[in-house]
Image (spheres, helix red, strand yellow):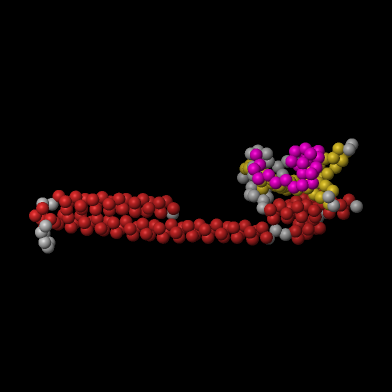
Amino acid sequence: MITVFKNRYKLSLALATFFILGMAASLFVIYSLPKSLRLADGYQSQFFSVYLVVAATFVVGALGLIVALRYKREVVILRDRSIEAAANKKQETEQSKTSISLDGVAASIQESAEGKEMLEAGLKAICKQLEAGQGAIYIATENDGKRSVELQGGYALSIGESTTISYEFGEGLIGQAAASGQSLYVDDVPEGYIKIVSGLGTASPKYLLIVPLKHNDQVMGVMEIASFTPISEDERKFSEESARLIASKIIIKAS
């Protein structure tokens, strides 16, 4: 549709050009007439070519103006529709953000059993609401005075169940979140850093959110969420609140 508008615009420019050339031709024809005919009164047959050129010029000029005006109105309509579509998209995005709820996460945790099943149920509920492509959850452990977080569950992970992944506190992004107790948000994940594998192929998400699981300032673990779309500030707050729910559940199960 936009291509058609562009073609009409070019057509209007061409017609306007012909209009100017026609006017110049009219002046040239009139100027070229013999002096006696130029001064004659009333209709003169010798002026027929002048009348014809002038009439054709005005017709072409009128067509050019009509097409240009129609194009202008169509561009305005297209612009208004684009603005309306952008506003609708923004409204839908805001509505989807407000639809996220902790109730779904709490219900998933409450209905699940202990251990890995509970962790994965909570993680799945979070990822579903955020429409994230992948998630992982790590639990903090301590051996010989060294603190680390070890992978305990995941959502859409492309690794085997027997695979062991762990990070010491301060090691990598996961370890940094565990050591600092602060969330990390990366909005430009390098290509190949994370792979999401499905039946349709392999893709790399661009956004990564890492949230510590804290209870009373104690880091119980770390939650990692990968997404193909930006994660808003409201969604990050939702993730942090959900992480506290999971951390409190870990404390209850451990006591």
Q: Which x, y percent locates residue 98?
A: 67, 60
- Residue 166 visible? The answer is no
Which quadrant is home to the N terminus?
bottom left
Q: Nearer the viewer, residue 189 or 19?
A: 19
Residue found 27% across the figure and 53% down from its top = 19
Q: As drawn, is 16 to the left or to the right of 230?
A: left
Question: Which residue extends farthest left?
Answer: 36
**Within the image, what quadrant is residue 200 found in?**
top right
Instruction: Count the labels in the image.
Output: 0
Q: Kindly give the residue lying farthest to the bottom in the view shown.
A: 42
Camera-nearest residue between 145 and 152:
145
Q: Nearest the camera: 28 or 92?
A: 28
Q: Is residue 215 visible?
A: yes
- Magenta stretch containing residue 167, yes or no? yes
- Measuring from the top left, give residue 51's x and y in whole percent: 18, 57
Q: Quadrant of residue 38?
A: bottom left
x, y percent for residue 104 = 74, 59
Residue extent of the magenta highlight: 163-190
Q: Residue at x 77, y 44 (%)?
A: 177
Where is residue 108? Give x, y as percent. 77, 57
Q: Residue at x 37, y 53 (%)?
A: 8
Instruction: Reply yes or no: does residue 216 show up in magenta.
Output: no
Who's the residue at 24% across and 55% down the image? 57
